[in-house]
Amino acid sequence: MRMGYELVLEQQQKLIMTPELKLALKILQLPAVELEELIQNELEANPVLDLVDDNRDEKTELQQKQEKKEKEKEIDWKEYLQYQGKSYSLEGFDSDEGSEFSYENFITYSYTLKEHLISQLRVSPISEKIRDIGEYIIESLDENGYLITTQEDMADILAVDIEAVRDALNIIQSFEPFGVGAIDLKECLLIQLKYKDIHNEKIEAIVKNHLDDIACNRLNNISKKLSISIEETQNYSDIIKNLEPKPGRAFEGSSSTKYVTPDVYIEKIGKEYVVIINDHYGSRLMINQYYKNILRSEDKSSNASAFINNKLSSAMWLIKSLEHRKNTLYSVVKAILEYQMDFFEKGPMYLRTMTLKRIADMVNVHESTVSRAISGKYVQTPRGIFEIKYFFKSGVDNQDGEAISSESIKKMIKNYVTGEDASKPISDQHIADSLVKEGYTISRRTVAKYRDELGILSSSKRKRY
């Protein structure tokens, strides 16, 4: 067999992910907030890009100069009176603050759990030593109000005796919300019973030894072991369930509130629904005219011309990608609106089964394109704000061969459970049989799965005696 080197000419066709294509796919997938951040970074990095000001003044430079001179001659009486320490209401003065006034600009400050406890500690009639230990204990609490450090460790770290730590901890446990400073759930509940003046040996015994039975609604076991009636056990169980297992969750945590910025708006105007894309920056991008003029006057082979050409290509591709994202998102949401019209007209009970493939066929794009277009995006509708993925639901078929979404099935299950007799709760099999009678083919296992997703307990745990 002869071996050697030789040149072979072949023609191949394969898909290459160019940087421009990667950028287009990234832009398609980004939600509105992250897209605005990307555009801001591009505006800072690319001098060819410019942002059109919608409120720009169309007056000539001469008119602007004349108005500027006239304003310099005028006296600002509002500012003058303000510095005199008086406040007057003068007609003829238009305030710019009125247009910016909004109650949304005022955010109420809410205490954290530790701040609330420290404020109670500072007004407590205790010694300076106990107050210092109390501050350390408060800083050792987690966001739910539980103590994450042992008393022995705190005594070693602070170089104090264990009795002083216990005294400080008892004071902290007497603060509101009751239950803070506990090591575990049992101690937390016992502290709440103590300071709510609920002194009952049976309830304390249930908390110490039968919390698992309370969670599983095994009231018969408790009734036999404590030699009390089932009605008494039910009443004690209700008292324990009304206690707060996480005292600190009523206060603001370390994580701030997250707000959703809709990427698409669906508004009903008259009898028609209109789709509006949230395109705050994309529609205002343009090419700076100054660099266009430089490109015309410069030599094509110069470094400045090559730099501007490179930035110009990048800017044009960005604008094109934003327009493609806008059109794709509009087409996808429009197809969802048409397919789920019963949902918008009648409510969640009429949400239909919908897949990516169905919408992709309606829009004539690939399923991956639809997936990228809806990823992490929200739509504001007359029925509230939803993640676009909310409308893509699996479901079951009815006797007519029509599919109904899992959300509609969950709504029906919730209605069944709401209307049940608490002393005789309906089972998953009973719910499945009822749905079959209404024409929906569904198994008991599927009902149990949907019930768990709704956070509804099983029939044995819902039973009341």
Image (cartoon, rainbow, N blue to C red):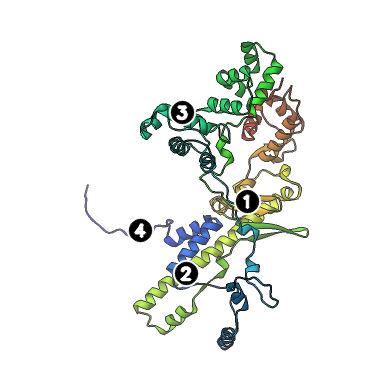
Q: CA distance from mark 4 to mark 2?
A: 36 Å
Q: Position of residue 187 (x, y in %)?
A: 53, 26
Query: Which labelled disc corresponds to residue 429?
Result: none
Task: Tell me if residue 189 comes above or below residue 256 in the rendering.
Answer: above
User: What residue would you read off at disc 2?
Assistant: 315
Query: What is the CA distance from the residue labelled 3 to the residue labelled 4?
Result: 84 Å
Would residue 435 be visible to someone looking at this image? no
Name the residue tied to disc 3.
Answer: 166
| Amino acid bearing label 3 | Arg
Q: Earlier in the sequence, mark 2 or mark 3?
A: 3
Horizontally, residue 173 falls left or right of residue 408, namely left
Instruction: Describe the element under mark 1 as helix, strand or loop.
Output: helix
Q: Earlier in the sequence, mark 1 or mark 2?
A: 2
- Tag 1–tag 3 contact (CB < 8 Å): no
Mark in front: 4 vs 2:
2
**Residue on which the image places disc 4:** 10
Residue 384 lies, with reference to residue 145, above or below; the image says below
| Picture disc at residue 359 | 1
Closer to the chain start, of discs 1 and 3, is 3
Q: Quadrant of residue 53?
A: bottom right
Q: Position of residue 285 (x, y in %)?
A: 53, 70
As drawn, 174 above or below 14: above
Q: CA distance from mark 1 to mark 2?
A: 31 Å
| Residues at marks 2 and 3 touching, judged by CB atoms closer than 8 Å | no
Q: x, y (%) of residue 8?
A: 30, 58
Q: Mark 4 or mark 3, which is nearer the start of the sequence?
A: 4
